[in-house]
């Protein structure tokens, strides 16, 4: 099953939120959708899931346009802060999803809700911000559609619930592989989950490649300040930190002739992201 975006453009008045985006999602993977605020991430997800219509371009699922295509939309599920179930309890939401999505696993939904200590008798609108995210997440993890889009899924969750969500995401993905597109600003938390990275910048696709290939573009060296400074002279330094007499510096480029006095480690996805889109991106 292949989901494709062809020359996708969306304008809001004089503002172009997406500008000629081309993407193809065609195999079970966990993709990271990254970008600064206003880069177009949520707009892209809302276009794919029929919340809004593109100004130009098309979105197809196996060559069939997804717009107002009920069969196609049953293969796609999006969770976002804006929800269609404001007046529903968790129990009622589960009943409705069981009717709409043949792949929805109600027993799993109830099991996950119990692990999160989620009160399914409460209406969505009465839950705290964190537990609203929990309810959305529990629904998403139980739906098992071929395409699952998660827009800031851990918004408002505490550290315990975020860790539990990531654990259950991997469990669900392992049991029922699907194409998962995870949009988040918490890059350091999800880096180990991502197999492919898509970076949007000013409405365009800046990066679309495997995490392994992307992270191979740079590295970090650490050691005594003078040794690090000597080695880094003339190299493309993208960030440094100093603790006591030790310095760690991130470098973009190939590793070469690193002296034994320095330790070498990989570059983090967050470090690379900041370099690619601007140091103010995570401010």
Image (spheres, rainbow, N blue to C red):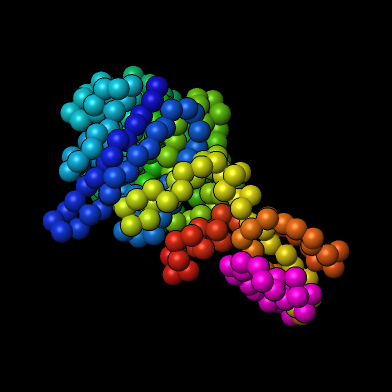
Q: Would you say residue 242 sits in the magenta stretch?
A: yes
User: With respect to residue 178, does 151 lie above or below?
Assistant: below
Q: Would you say residue 239 sits in the magenta stretch?
A: yes
Query: Which x, y percent locates residue 107?
Result: 43, 25
At x 55%, y 33%, the residue is 171
Query: Which x, y percent locates residue 209?
Result: 51, 42
Q: Which residues are magenta?
A: 226-244
In the rendered image, which quarter is residue 141 located in?
A: top left
At x 31%, y 49%, the residue is 42
Query: Which x, y percent locates residue 150?
Result: 39, 42
The N terminus lies in quadrant? top left
Which sits in the foreground, 217 or 174?
Answer: 217
Which sits in the foreground, 14 or 97?
Answer: 14
Q: Is residue 149 visible?
A: yes
| Position of residue 220 in the picture relative to residue 90 (left or right) | right
At x 56%, y 61%, the residue is 271
């Amino acid at each position: 099953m292949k989901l494709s975006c062809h020359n996708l453009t969306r304008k809001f008045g004089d503002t172009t939120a997406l500008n000629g985006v081309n993407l193809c999602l065609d195999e079970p993977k966990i993709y990271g959708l990254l970008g600064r605020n206003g880069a177009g991430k949520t707009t892209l997800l809302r276009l794919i899931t029929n919340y809004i219509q593109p100004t130009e371009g098309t979105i197809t699922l196996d060559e069939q346009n997804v717009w107002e295509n009920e069969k196609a939309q049953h293969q796609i599920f999006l969770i976002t802060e804006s929800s269609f179930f404001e007046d529903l309890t968790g129990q009622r939401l589960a009943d409705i999803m069981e009717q709409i999505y043949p792949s929805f696993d109600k027993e799993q939904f109830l099991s996950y809700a119990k692990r999160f200590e989620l009160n399914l008798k409460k209406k969505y609108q009465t839950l705290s911000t964190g537990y609203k995210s929990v309810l959305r997440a529990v629904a998403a993890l139980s739906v098992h559609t071929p395409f699952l889009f998660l827009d800031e899924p851990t918004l408002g969750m505490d550290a315990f619930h975020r860790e539990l969500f990531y654990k259950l995401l991997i469990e669900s993905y392992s049991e029922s592989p699907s194409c998962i597109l995870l949009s988040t600003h918490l890059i350091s938390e999800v880096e180990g989950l991502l197999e492919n990275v898509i970076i949007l910048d000013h409405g365009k696709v800046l990066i679309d490649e495997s995490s392994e290939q992307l992270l191979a573009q740079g590295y970090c060296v650490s050691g005594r300040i003078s040794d690090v400074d000597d080695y880094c002279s003339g190299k493309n330094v993208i960030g440094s930190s100093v603790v006591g007499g030790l310095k760690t510096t991130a470098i973009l480029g190939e590793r070469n002739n690193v002296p034994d006095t320095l330790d070498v480690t990989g570059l983090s996805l967050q470090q690379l992201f900041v370099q690619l889109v601007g140091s103010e991106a995570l401010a």
